[in-house]
Image: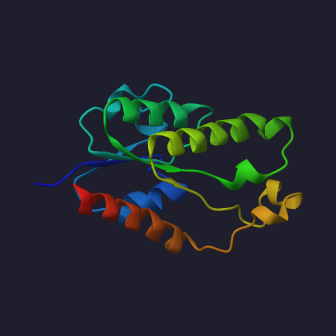
């Protein structure tokens, strides 16, 4: 009997790489296929959710709902938490700070990497530039998922 894992933001970017690396059964959740992380009622029935998509406060909403439903939740954070930001990015920073704090409080994994050097935030925050490859980041997520599988 397998467990069902879901990935938010599974159709493009980092979420697609994560989704493609996971074994079946798996489900993908993105705005493009009708799922809104700000209203995560749809996570019922999952065993694990990889909370990758960003949409304002949506990641924290999803993390809270997963905790309430006792669904294992692997949160994908961001080093925006360590960046000096302008008002344009303040909501994203505050949301990631809340996600990081909630993850720690309830024991949900919180994985994070920096930004690529071409990202606008990297210009004034060279300390948040990452050297990790996409493959290595995906491996970290896969390893976290495998650790959880070994415990159940």
Q: Is residue 77 left or right of residue 28?
A: right
Q: Position of residue 70 (x, y in %)?
A: 31, 36
Q: Is residue 113 above or below residue 139?
A: above
Locate residue 29: give its quadrant: top left
Question: Does residue 37 show up?
Answer: no
Locate residue 147: give its quadrant: bottom left
- The colouring scheme, among rainbow, by chain, secondary structure or one colour, is rainbow
Image quarter where the N terminus lies is bottom left
Of residues 59 and 34, which is closer to you in this image?
59
Question: Does residue 77 show up?
Answer: yes
Q: Position of residue 5 (x, y in %)?
A: 30, 50
Q: Position of residue 123 (x, y in %)?
A: 87, 60
Q: Residue at x 72, y 34 (%)?
A: 91
Image quarter where the C terminus lies is bottom left
Q: Is residue 150 above or below residue 44?
A: below
Query: Extreme left residue here?
Result: 1
Q: Is residue 93 above or below residue 126?
A: above
Query: Extreme front residue here?
Result: 105
Q: Residue at x 62, y 73 (%)?
A: 132
Q: Position of residue 22 (x, y in %)?
A: 33, 62
Q: Residue at x 51, y 74 (%)?
A: 136
Of residues 14 and 106, which is closer to you in this image?
106
Q: Is residue 126 left or right of residue 51?
A: right
Of residues 151 and 48, which is closer to you in this image?
151
Number of labels in the image equals: 0
Q: Is residue 79 left or right of residue 89?
A: left
């Amino acid at each position: 009997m397998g467990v069902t894992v879901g990935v938010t933001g599974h159709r493009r970017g980092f979420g697609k790489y994560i989704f493609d690396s996971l074994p079946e059964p798996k489900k993908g959740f993105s705005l493009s296929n009708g799922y809104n992380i700000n209203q995560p009622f749809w996570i019922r029935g999952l065993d694990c959710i990889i909370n990758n998509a960003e949409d304002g406060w949506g990641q924290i909403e999803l993390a809270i709902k997963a905790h309430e439903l006792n669904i294992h939740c692997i949160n994908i954070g961001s080093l925006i938490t360590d960046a000096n930001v302008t008002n344009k990015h303040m909501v994203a920073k505050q949301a990631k700070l809340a996600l990081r704090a909630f993850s720690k409080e309830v024991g949900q994994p919180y994985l994070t990497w920096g930004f690529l050097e071409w990202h606008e935030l990297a210009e004034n925050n060279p300390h948040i530039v990452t050297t990790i490859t996409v493959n290595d980041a995906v491996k970290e997520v896969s390893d976290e998922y495998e650790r959880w599988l070994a415990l159940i």
